[in-house]
């Protein structure tokens, strides 16, 4: 069963992301079973690139997690091509700048630049959700402007597609 797992890193970057986004989570990844390697694996955008690794290496400081109650394996195929792409530090900087402008001036600004070479964690998950035809409103999520907190709220607002896993 495919899950979306939201975490809150205790690093300075994690604290900054949560402060800027006024959020509970600073990272999100996709946990899924692997028929090739066995067990549960995490697909996530983290330094230095989008990678797949055993899920237990990513499961720390969990805020919330949800079962994806839609054809998630099909949607996972969409992001398979993202594995191996570099982490988007320029995208992180741009998203941080956008959030800072929003937080201080309460105005949305244009994203300064977009990196087609890299990914952020929320960008990767947004691409998967947009590929899932059964998820209503997913096409409204913009990968360039979506934060982990926005995805967390999105999951909470769509309980038919995302079943919260109690702690």
Image: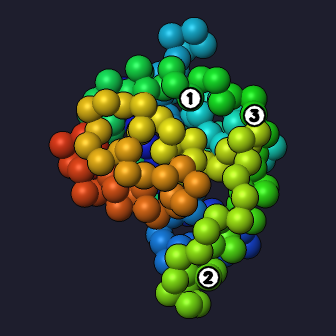
Disc nearer the start of the sequence (3/2): 3
Q: Secondary structure at mark 3?
A: loop
Is residue 21 depicted above or below 167 in this figure?
Answer: below
Which label lies toward us, 3 or 2?
2
Q: Which residue is mark 1?
A: 79
Question: Residue at horizontal 62%, vertical 40%?
Answer: 44
Q: Residues within 10 Å of mark 3 (few under 14, many from 20)?
A: some
- Given residues 104 and 21, the one toward you in this image is 104
Question: Residue at horizontal 25%, vertical 57%?
Answer: 157
User: Image quarter for residue 102?
Assistant: bottom right
Side of 93 where 157 appears, left or right: left
Q: Is residue 38 visible?
A: yes
Q: Residues within 10 Å of mark 1 (few under 14, many from 20)?
A: some
Question: Number of marks in the image?
Answer: 3
x then y, percent, for residue 23: 48, 72
Q: Which residue is mark 3?
A: 85
Give the Cα distance between marks 3 and 2: 28 Å
Disc nearer the start of the sequence (1/2): 1
Q: Is residue 53 visible?
A: no
- Given residues 29 and 62, the one toward you in this image is 29
x then y, percent, for residue 81: 64, 23
Q: Quadrant of the N terminus?
A: top left
Give the Cα distance between marks 1 and 2: 30 Å
Q: Secondary structure at mark 1?
A: helix
Which label lies toward us, 1 or 2?
2
Question: Residue at horizontal 75%, vertical 34%?
Answer: 85
Marks 2 and 3: in contact by CB < 8 Å?
Answer: no
- Given residues 140 and 87, the one toward you in this image is 140
x then y, percent, for residue 14: 65, 67
Q: Which residue is mark 2?
A: 101
Is residue 69 depicted above or below 139 in this figure?
Answer: above
- Given residues 19 and 95, the one toward you in this image is 95
């Amino acid at each position: 069963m495919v899950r979306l797992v939201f975490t809150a890193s205790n690093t300075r970057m994690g604290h900054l992301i949560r402060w800027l986004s006024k959020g509970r989570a600073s990272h999100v990844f996709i946990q899924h079973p692997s028929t090739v390697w066995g067990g549960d694996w995490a697909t996530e955008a983290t330094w230095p690139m989008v990678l797949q690794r055993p899920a237990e290496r990513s499961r720390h400081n969990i805020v919330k997690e949800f079962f994806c109650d839609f054809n998630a394996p099909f949607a996972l195929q969409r992001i398979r091509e993202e594995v191996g792409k570099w982490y988007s530090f320029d995208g992180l900087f741009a998203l941080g700048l956008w959030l800072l402008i929003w937080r201080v001036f309460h105005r949305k600004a244009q994203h300064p630049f977009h990196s087609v070479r890299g990914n952020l964690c929320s960008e990767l998950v947004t691409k998967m959700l947009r590929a899932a035809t059964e998820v209503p409103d997913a096409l409204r999520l913009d990968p360039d402007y979506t934060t982990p907190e926005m995805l967390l709220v999105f999951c909470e607002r769509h309980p038919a597609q995302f079943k919260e896993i109690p702690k």
